[in-house]
Image (cartoon, rainbow, N blue to C red):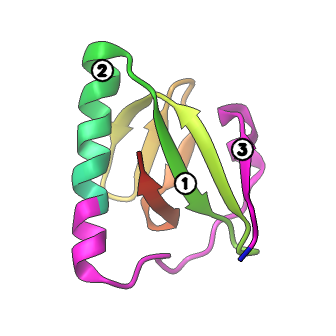
Amino acid sequence: MRTIEQIEKEQVSMINFAKQDVLSDPQAIKLRMADLHRSQTLGNLLQTKVRLTFRSIDEQVYEVHTTVWAVGSDFVVLKGGVTIPIRSILRVE
């Protein structure tokens, strides 16, 4: 497995994402959504940052430490309007 590359949220827009979900377990997908909604609440109420770990189309794993402002059905919106497809997120911490 490749190492996790730490990046700034401004660099996320330069990454290409795969069309398929990085998670295959339905329970893990459900947990990811619960974690994302919790991170949105923390971000909006307390301006608390979380670590989002996600995978690009070339299978490189990245981590960004940021505030989640909104969670949609397909994308997460970070501070500054940067988006990440939910299907690419491996974990939320």
Determine the image quadrant of residue 91. Answer: bottom left
| Mark 2 residue type | Asn
Q: Residue at x 29, y 72 (%)?
A: 28
Judging from the image, what secondary structure is the residue with disc 3 in?
strand
Residue 6 is tagged as: 3
Q: Quadrant of the C terminus?
A: top left
Looking at this view, is 93 or 21 the one in front? 93
Horizontal relation, residue 21 to residue 43: left or right = right
Give the magenta-colored segment's residue range.
2-31
Horizontal relation, residue 10 to residue 67: left or right = right
Q: Is residue 88 above or below residue 79?
A: below
Residue 32 is tagged as: none
Horizontal relation, residue 90 to residue 3: left or right = left
Residue density around tag 2, few if under 14, some if 14–19, many if 20 or more, within 10 Å: few
Marks 2/3: CA–CA distance: 23 Å
| N-term mark: 1 or 3 | 3
Looking at this view, is 53 or 77 the one in front? 53
Residue density around tag 3, few if under 14, some if 14–19, many if 20 or more, within 10 Å: few
Q: Residue at x 69, y 45 (%)?
A: 12
Q: Nearer the viewer, mark 1 or mark 2?
A: 1
| Mark 1 residue type | Thr
Q: Quadrant of the N terminus?
A: bottom right
Q: Residue at x 22, y 76 (%)?
A: 27
Q: Return the residue at label 2.
A: 44
